[in-house]
């Protein structure tokens, strides 16, 4: 395999790991309707980081970087919204 292909495989693997890392947390929060153990600061910082990575990718014209970080940004925002909504458990209680 060529170096360019290995680089793309590495980048794709990194993107998939990052994207899928949020899914179990979001599923757990929604299923239990409780996000009291989730760190607000960590997710707020993560949202900022993915936003900056996305902007950086746009500025470079690196569309795979933009796509991967946009999906991760969306998932991190979802987790953050769930944190606010379910911060003390089910709001229906």
Image: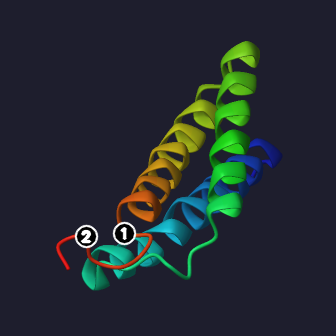
Residue at position x 44%, y 58% in the image: 84
Q: Residue 14 at what x, y percent from top left?
A: 67, 60
Residue tagged 1: 86
Residue sitting at the far left = 92
Quarter-of-image position of residue 10? bottom right
> In the rendered view, would you say 31 is above or below 40?
below
User: Mark 1 Cα within 10 Å, few/some/many (few <14, many 20+)?
Assistant: many
Which tag is nearer the camera, tag 2 or tag 1? 2
> In the rendered view, would you say 86 is above or below 5?
below
- Determine whether, in the image, residue 35 is placed left or right of residue 48: left
- Front in this rendered view, residue 77 or 67: 77
Which element carries disc 2, helix, strand or loop?
loop
Q: Residue 62 at what x, y percent from top left?
A: 68, 25
Q: Residue 92 at what x, y percent from top left?
A: 17, 73
Residue at position x 68%, y 23% in the image: 55
In which quadrant will I find the C terminus?
bottom left
Residue at position x 68%, y 52% in the image: 46
> In the rendered view, would you say 93 is above or below 73?
below
User: Mark 2 Cα within 10 Å, few/some/many (few <14, many 20+)?
Assistant: few
Q: Are marks 2 and 1 in contact (CB under 8 Å)?
A: yes
In which quadrant will I find the N terminus?
bottom right
- Front in this rendered view, residue 7 or 75: 75
Residue at position x 56%, y 43% in the image: 68
Q: Which mark is residue 16?
A: none
- Front in this rendered view, residue 10 or 43: 43
Describe the colour scheme in one phrase.
rainbow
- Front in this rendered view, residue 80 or 5: 80
Q: Which mark is residue 91?
A: 2
**Label 2 – label 1 distance at C-alpha:** 6 Å
């Amino acid at each position: 395999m060529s170096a360019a292909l290995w680089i793309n495989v590495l980048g794709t693997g990194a993107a998939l790991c990052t994207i899928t890392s949020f899914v179990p947390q979001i599923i757990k929060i929604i299923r239990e309707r409780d996000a009291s153990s989730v760190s607000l600061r960590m997710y707020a910082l993560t949202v900022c980081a993915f936003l900056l990575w996305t902007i950086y990718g746009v500025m470079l014209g690196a569309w795979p970087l933009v796509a991967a970080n946009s999906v991760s940004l969306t998932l991190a925002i979802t987790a953050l919204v769930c944190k606010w909504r379910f911060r003390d458990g089910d709001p229906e209680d």
